[in-house]
Amino acid sequence: MSRKGKFQYALEPVLLTRQWDLDALLLDLGRINESLAALRQELSALQEEINKTAAEWKQASQASAGLNVGSFAVVTRYMNDLTCRRSLKEQAIAAEEAARDALIDRVEAAQRGVEAVEQHRDEVKADFNTLRLSEEFKFADDHWSTLQGREKT
């Protein structure tokens, strides 16, 4: 607890380990958030492509007497491919969000662990300071008593 009157916290390695674990979890959370942002951007691009293709399809079908069977089949397959890809992106986003939510729970638990050790350290340090002040007061009192005894003799 102390060496030469200085406070040393015996559980400092535990605190450091917990802080490192928390830092690693926060780093992982940052990576998941980056991944989510990229997936959402890809989903947005797919949705824009779907909207653009649908608008072009509608415009082409209104401009002429309709699309021929070959063009209709190509556009239909392309739209089907785009919607399948959008569905897969939405599933990937949902999975990544679930992983993020689970990681957030772990981050919160790790944060509580760090805070608990920090609170314990602060309480032990306060007790140490109180004890040290008490010892210093006792020493000063003994010293004063000794000096008073010398003056009387």
Image (cartoon, rainbow, N blue to C red):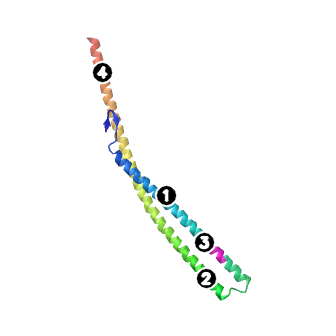
Q: Which mark is residue 76?
A: 2
Q: Which residue is mark 1?
A: 30
- Classify 10 Å Cα crowding around label 2: few (below 14), some (14-19), many (20 and above): some
Whether pointer 4 and pointer 3 mark residues with C-beta atoms closer than 8 Å, the reply is: no
Question: Callout 4: helix, strand or loop?
Answer: helix
The segment highlighted magenta reads 47-54
26 in relation to 2, above or below:
below
Q: Position of residue 6 (x, y in %)?
A: 35, 35
Which one is earlier in the sequence, the residue at label 1 or at label 4?
Answer: 1
110 in relation to 2, above or below:
below
Q: CA distance from mark 2 to mark 4?
A: 98 Å
51 in relation to 135, above or below:
below
- Amino acid type indicated by mark 1: Gly
Question: Callout 2: helix, strand or loop?
Answer: helix
Q: Which residue is mark 4?
A: 143
Query: Is 78 situated left or right of 149 in this image?
Result: right
58 in relation to 38, above or below:
below
Q: Which residue is mark 3?
A: 47
Whether pointer 3 and pointer 2 mark residues with C-beta atoms closer than 8 Å, the reply is: no
Whether pointer 1 and pointer 4 mark residues with C-beta atoms closer than 8 Å, the reply is: no
